[in-house]
Amino acid sequence: MNIGVIGPGTIGEVIIRKLRDSGYPVKMANARGPESLKDLAEKTGAIPVSVEQVVQDVDILFLAVPQKSIPGLPKGLLSKARKETIVIDVGNYYPFRDGRINEIENGLTESVWVERQIGRPVVKVLNTIASKALMAAGRPAGNRDRVALPISGDNPKAKEIVAQLIDRIGFDSVDAGAIAESWRQQPGSPVYCTNPTKEELQLWLQKVDRSSLPTDREKGLKAYYPTRDADYQAQIKAHRSVLVRCL
């Protein structure tokens, strides 16, 4: 299975490392060009290419860029990808970083907005785990405390393939429904950066209060900020202190 990653930043780099550690061939690209990725290529074995090249001849393409960067992708970029390529949206909307996106502020689900920008359906996954946790919290299948990640999308077969990949890099998964329902895993949700087990995730997905997401997103940020340099357990504890308190 060939994989492409657009946006090897904080979370994108960890995704690349996890994929390469699991034996997947990976191409990667950013807006600055292949030369800027030379060091990461040497460390991971991922192949730096242009943005136009990274979408070609891959089975899965990860979009790991800030929400504000999605409209800046080259027009028609995804037309260069195969029809069957699975596009994964890893991003989250944070107004302080992305600026105000009126459609999302008015209630449009974040990943539906992404689909409209790129003209392709997406699968939503890996947006609910902090980069440090993604790097260090993976466990073998069957581990009682294995972290579970929600997967949303409209194509059952694509979600099944993504679930197999998630298992291979050390995590359980739960089918969280259609992409229109992926607001359940947006920032502010109790499943966001709280490292739930599979049983917790299944329960908490049903208890998300959509109306409270913007407020709880800001509360989560305030709790997380003092732990940004701490280990992932401290970050998870901070998020749980505000996002899971009422469940």
Image: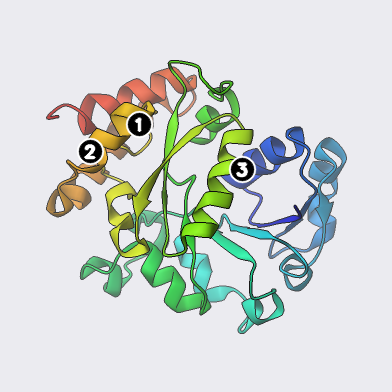
Which residue: 35% across, 31% down?
224
Q: What residue sits right under mark 3 in the picture?
A: 165
Residue 54 position, x and y percent, is 75, 65
Instruction: Say what amino acid the circle numbered 2 marks.
Output: Lys
Report the Cα–Cα distance between label 3 and label 2.
32 Å
The image shows residue 9, relative to residue 60, as above or below, that is above
Res 88 label: none
Q: Nearer the N terminus, badge 3 or badge 2?
A: 3
Q: Residue at x 40, y 25 (%)?
A: 235
Rendered view: 194 above or below 231 = below
Height in image: 245 above or below 30? above
In the rendered structure, the answer to whether residue 22 lies left or right of residue 160 reads right
Instruction: Give the residue type that dot 3 points to.
Output: Leu
Q: Helix, strand or loop at disc 3?
A: helix
> Relative to 237, is 13 on the left or the right?
right
In the image, which is nearer the foreground, mark 3 or mark 2? 3
Mark 2 to mark 1 CA distance (whole Å): 9 Å
Q: Residue at x 50, y 16 (%)?
A: 143
Q: Which residue is labeled 1 in the image?
A: 224
SS category of the residue bearing label 1: helix
Determine whether label 3 and label 1 are within 8 Å by CB: no
- Name which quarter of the figure residue 170 lies in: top right
Task: Please name the colour scheme applied to the rendered image.
Answer: rainbow
Q: Is residue 239 visible?
A: no
Residue 219: assigned label:
2
Pointer 2 or 1: first along the chain = 2
Report, in whole angstroms, how far the alpha carbon at label 3 lies from the one at label 1.
28 Å
Label 2: few (<14), some or many (≥20) within 10 Å? some
Circle 3 crowding by C-alpha within 10 Å: few under 14, some 14–19, many from 20: some
Instruction: Tell which residue pokes out farthest to the top in this image.
Output: 144
